Amino acid sequence: MSTLSPRAGAPRAARRRAAAVGGASVPGPRPVRVALLGCGTVGGGLLTVLERNRADIERKVGRPIDIAHVVVRDAGKPRGPAVPAHLVTTRADQALADPGVDVVVEAMGGTGAALEYILRALRAGKTVVTANKDVMADHGREVWAAAEAGGADVYFEAAVGGGIPIVRALKESLAGNSVRRVAGILNGTTNYMLTRMTRDGSSLEAALAEAQAAGYAEADPSADVDGLDAARKLCILSSIAYSVRCRMADVHVEGIRGVSAADVAYARRMGWTVKLLAISELRDGRVTMRVHPTLVPVAHPLAAVSDAFNAVYVQGDAIGDAMFYGSGAGALPTASAILGDLMDAVRRHGTGVRQTECTCFYRRPFDGIGAVPSRFYVRLLVPDRVGVLAKIAGVFGRSGVSILSVLQGPTLAAPEGPGERSGAAGPVADLIIVTHEVREDRLQRAIAGLRHLEAVAGISAVLRLAPEDL
Ligand SMILES: NC(=O)c1ccc[n+]([C@@H]2O[C@H](COP(=O)([O-])OP(=O)(O)OC[C@H]3O[C@@H](n4cnc5c(N)ncnc54)[C@H](OP(=O)(O)O)[C@@H]3O)[C@@H](O)[C@H]2O)c1
């Protein structure tokens, strides 16, 4: 089997060992052989960076890295110059069964064949490096069980935050902390769209079209726009942060489809910027996880994360606050994360020392969104007449919701939103109420009361503010 490892780049240590000793030559360290499953954006990026930095990479890990197979769906597709054409194959079975393969890098995506190959490789004792958030979030238990069965390692830095080294940071550098909150901008597409809406006043539809034109959004953007992509990443980070198995079913997920240009503009006027935040918290031994549009104070570091960038804000008892920022996707940033994992795998190869195993050793209760305390921004469409505010304040008061501030102005937008009721006769105005912190179920009780109030022509938006101690 031919492999890809230009010897010119072999590490000096390896070459020294291969040099003659007393006339006899001793072999250098055996190369670590890698099967790459998938050679699209991420797999192609990996090969590009590996070739570009090979000499330094191999010097750092002390042995050559050979790409032995590049498995794809369509072997006839043109690939970049970094892809060794003679290694490209559609025969995944052959690559996985090759006893000489030490590490399998999975960059195919999806939970069909990719999951099957990952499980097979791990059970056979091969280290797996994957960029696959769907597999890690939805099938983490099976993956870790297979790793245990095969005595193998599984690495997944690239599955969350692209190039941002957050998985390793939580697993290792911050492992001594008791983490109380993780709050992240984990989806570049929605962050790009919200940035356009904030900077240019674009509508959601226009921002989506721009994101698609710039190559940040898929033709079907629902996984991003509806918050599912961020939710999967939050599951992965929260599992590590709180040592508990987190499932998608435990995440409250709201995407950005309900965010209007008017709310972005009002928020700006009031000193906030709208971000799709993925937030998980550990409080009194209980975990909450949620993804939703959030009003973040403009002075907060997360508010400055714009365009397609990602960031993860971690709050721990020892570190205090720490933010990790960078490119959350793309060929080379994601390759950077995969290479970090691959290099760790190569260093450990043959030593018998595994990396950190699954640390989901607690069973903790999860609370739904109803139990989460937040401050809320509620935009109502109201008839512009005397006495309306008092009636609305009465509904909030009876629901146990305390009002922090009220802003009234001519409408910036036509009424919108799922809670809409039309039919107001005469002039109407936007009324924006910001509440003190209150459990979500109480706020929802107040919203239900407002729906029946004649003084409210429409409930245009209900948004949460970022936690005060974020
Ligand atoms: N793109 C990013 O910026 C990014 C960032 C972080 C994580 N990720 C994750 O990385 C993974 C790959 O993403 P990508 O953007 O690189 O996808 P992609 O560009 O669509 O590439 C997928 C690759 O996998 C191959 N493939 C798909 N199904 C296969 C099958 N059943 N058998 C053999 N080969 C198969 C494809 O072959 P062909 O080339 O022949 O079609 C292609 O080479 C996904 O899990 C994704 O979530 C991506």
Image (tube, grey):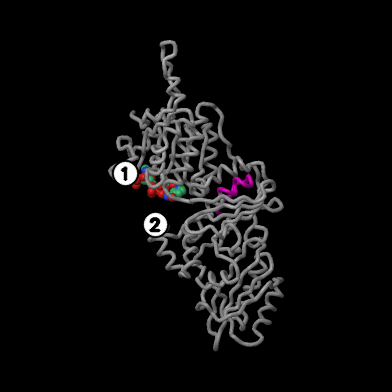
Q: Which residue is mark 2?
A: 215
Quadrant where the N terminus sits is top left
Please give left or right for residue 321 compared with residue 59 in the image: right
| Gap in angstroms between the C-alphas marked 1 and 2 | 19 Å
Name the residue at the top extreme: 22
The spot of residue 288 in percent (x, y) is: 63, 55
- Asked if disc 1 is less than 8 Å from ligand 1, the answer is yes
Circles 1 and 2: CB distance less than 8 Å? Answer: no
Looking at the rendered structure, which numbered label has been put on residue 79? 1
What residue is at 43 percent from the left and 27 percent from the top?
31
As shown in the figure, which amino acid type bears the numbered disc 2? Gly
> Which region shows up in magenta?
236-250
Query: Which residue is nearer to you in this view: 313 or 251?
Result: 313
The part of the image, by quadrant, that contains residue 378 is bottom right
- Graded by Cα atoms within 10 Å as few (under 14), some (14 to 19) or many (20 or more), the crowding at tag 1 reads some
What residue is at 53 percent from the left and 81 percent from the top?
422
The spot of residue 405 in percent (x, y) is: 67, 74
The spot of residue 210 in percent (x, y) is: 41, 63
- What secondary structure is the stretch in magenta mostly built from? helix
